[in-house]
Image (cartoon, rainbow, N blue to C red):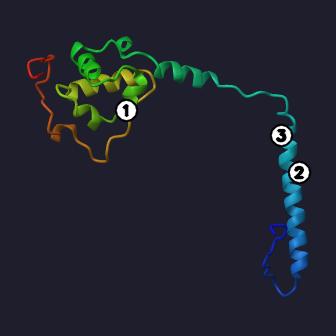
Amino acid sequence: DFDRLVVDVETKPSMKPRDAVASAGKTLVELFGLARELNVDAEGIEMGPSVMDAALAADLALPIEDLDLTVRSYNCLKREGIHTVGELVNRSEADLLDIRNFGSKSIDEIKAKLVSMGMSLKDSPAGFDPTKHQNFNASDDDFAEADQA
């Protein structure tokens, strides 16, 4: 039977447990009444997606072609199966550096494009240094297809 509530009340000797529960109940009723009054003005208002949510959704659905990336960056992302900004922002710097022929210059380009849109890459691990990554190559200036199988 779940129609029962058991409460263990400890009070100061100057107050009876019954009075303490009654006082607490009265306070709760007053507070819930105030909260209910705050909601009266909002009745009848239908909440829909905000303009900000719609703009963010549009930006996330934007194809990477519209970012005007260099050919190297664009080809690397496409080859990795990244087709939208939403898919791009779900990757960290470490994830992107795992892509063959994608170096720190490409990372900097991507980060700059995302910052201009008010976005960023998924957080990289604390203390991550791209120059120490196994695929880092400071001379990555041009797209190199020669390494592909």
Badge 1: few (under 14), some or many (20 or more) residues near its Cα, within 10 Å? many
* Upstream in sequence: badge 1 or badge 3: 3
How far across and down, in percent of the image, does residue 124 sit? 32, 41
10 Å neighbourhood of mark 3: few (<14), some, or many (≥20)?
few
Query: Is 14 above or below relative to 128?
Result: below
Residue that carries the numbered disc 3 in the rendered image: 39
Q: Is residue 61 left or right of residue 97?
A: right
**Mark 2 is on which residue type?**
Gly
What label sits on residue 89 in the rendered view?
Answer: none
| Helix, strand or loop under label 1 | loop
Vertical position of residue 1 compared to residue 64: above or below:
below
Q: How many marks?
A: 3
Of the numbered discs in the image, which one, if any, rests on residue 121?
Answer: 1
| x, y percent for residue 127 | 27, 47
Which amino acid type is marked by label 3? Asn
Three-letter amino acid code of the residue under disc 1: Leu
Residue hosting label 2: 33
- Say what secondary structure mark 3 lies in: helix
